[in-house]
Image: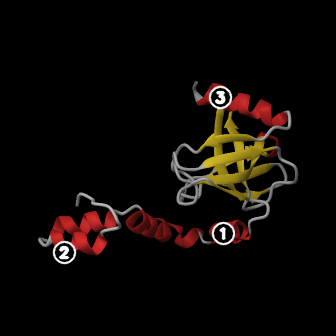
Amino acid sequence: MQNDEFIPEVCKLIDMGHQVTIRARGYSMRPFIEHNRDELVFGQVKRPVVVGDVVLAEITPGHFVCHRVDAVGDKRIRLRGDGNIYGTEICRREDVRAMLDAIIRKGTQWNLETSRVWHIYSWLWVRLLGVRKHLLAIYRIFWMHQLPRRISRHIPFKSTLKRIFKRGEQKDY
């Protein structure tokens, strides 16, 4: 089933009062929501949307995004994916279809309303837009394990590097 058919059905379930869990797809919310790893638990919008909330919104008819609220106006809301530096989306307040209630990562559920870590992260991430490019680069290099591969291509002593960067499993450098 395509997203343009699937997400409206999800929105109907949410409107009926259900919580819906969807596996994350895409990279725009990286580094904190990872493609194909995390599951997103959406629920009804129960309070006014504020900067830092993660919402499911219909940007244009049939086109939905799950992004963080970047700015709130009287009638419009600006959204930006955590992994996006420049791109934003604008939607009307009534186009916000659901709010992210929890994230399930590696079997652990993080309730976003009560998680102090999530609130601190949200507050900081929205305000770190100027350095987000550098933080995302650091994430890509270290946490995505690109540094060991990059170095080993340019240095002749690969066996030494394998011992240095070995993390409990054999990797092909």
Residue 108 vs 17, above or below: the answer is below
Q: Which residue is mark 2?
A: 160
Q: Which residue is mark 3?
A: 6
Neighbour class for label 1 at 10 Å: few (<14), some, many (≥20)? some
The image quadrant of residue 167 is bottom left
Neighbour class for label 2 at 10 Å: few (<14), some, many (≥20)? few
Residue 23 screen position, x and y as percent: 59, 42
Report the amino acid beneath label 1. Answer: Tyr
As drawn, is 67 to the left or to the right of 53?
left
Q: Secondary structure at mark 3?
A: helix
- Find the residue positioned furthest to the left: 156
**Is 77 in front, or is 135?**
135
Residue 109 screen position, x and y as percent: 68, 55
Q: Secondary structure at mark 2?
A: helix
Mark 3 or mark 2: which comes first in sequence?
3
The residue that appears at 38% across and 66% down in the rendered structure is 141
- Find the residue positioned furthest to the front: 168
CB under 8 Å between discs 1 and 2: no
Marking on residue 121: 1
As drawn, is 167 to the left or to the right of 74?
left
Report the amino acid beneath label 2. Answer: Thr
The residue that appears at 49% across and 70% down in the rendered structure is 135
**Is 92 in front, or is 57?**
57
Q: CA distance from mark 1 to mark 2?
A: 37 Å
Report the amino acid beneath label 3. Answer: Phe
Q: CA distance from mark 3 to mark 2?
A: 50 Å
Mark 3 or mark 1: which comes first in sequence?
3
Neighbour class for label 3 at 10 Å: few (<14), some, many (≥20)? few
Residue 147 screen position, x and y as percent: 32, 68
Q: Secondary structure at mark 1?
A: helix
